[in-house]
Amino acid sequence: MNRFLTSFLGWFGWGGALGQHSGQQSGAPSSALIEGSSNIGPDGAMQLSTVWSCVWLLANTIATLPFFVYTQKDGMRELARDTMLWVILHDSPNSRMTPVEFWVAMLLNLILRGNAYARIERDENGEAEALWPMAADQVEMHILDDGSVAYKYYIGGNVAVLSEDSVLHIKEIGNGNIGFARLDYMRA
């Protein structure tokens, strides 16, 4: 199938990133719409002062917005300050990062790569006690035959396989399984 037809069909969800319903998920377009277009990735784009400034402004502005957790009591919504979820999302996501640092890291991945991932660290009772950002370009999402999701995280020459209960996955627009990276589509 020629490149134009593949690209055309991809716009309507047939083939390409929109058509992936099982197996390894990819947020990249299946082919370039324009022959010979530049291949500038997130790291190259961040070397442009305009891109750096826009990404910095977006990430730092959103990361400094208040993040609240609520609970429902007697039909009324009230702040859930006494929960571990409040502590993780509002006060301290992990032992090395402030909430702003955590959300900036997550937003950088989301803005530049279309997906943001954090490993959920749990206590002996299975309750979340920390969130650790993972570099989006080191994570692969797989939909298994039984419909469950597994994440492969490549770090330090090793591969960690994580269940969907162990990963916070925030997606840009995409196929419902994985977010699409804007830069991949801008260069296609």
Image: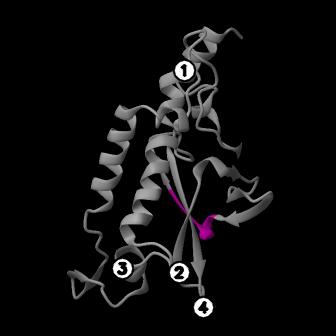
Q: In which quarter of the image is residue 26?
A: top right
Q: How far apart are marks 1 and 4 (CA)?
A: 47 Å
At label 4, counting other C-alpha atoms closer than 10 Å, the crowd grade (few under 14, some 14-19, many 20 or more) is few
Q: Earlier in the sequence, mark 4 or mark 3?
A: 3
Q: Is residue 46 left or right of residue 125?
A: left
Q: Quadrant of the C terminus?
A: top right
- Residue 13, how many percent across, how many down? 55, 28
Nearest the viewer among 24 and 144 is 24
What is the distance, in whole Å, between disc 2 and disc 1 at their CAs?
39 Å
Mark 1 or 4, closer to the camera: 1
Residue 10 in picture, x, y percent from top left: 57, 22
Q: Identify the residue under disc 2.
A: 128
Query: What residue span does the magenta drawing correspond to?
Result: 164-169
The residue that label 3 is drawn on is: 91
Q: Nearer the viewer, mark 3 or mark 2?
A: 3
Residue at left offset 46%, top offset 37%: 46
The local secondary structure at tag 2 comes to strand
**Residue 25 is a magenta residue:** no
Residue assigned mark 4: 125
Residue at 59% over, 54% down: 135
Mark 4 vs mark 3: in front: 3
Inter-mark Cα distance, 2 to 4: 9 Å
Residue 188, numbered circle: 1
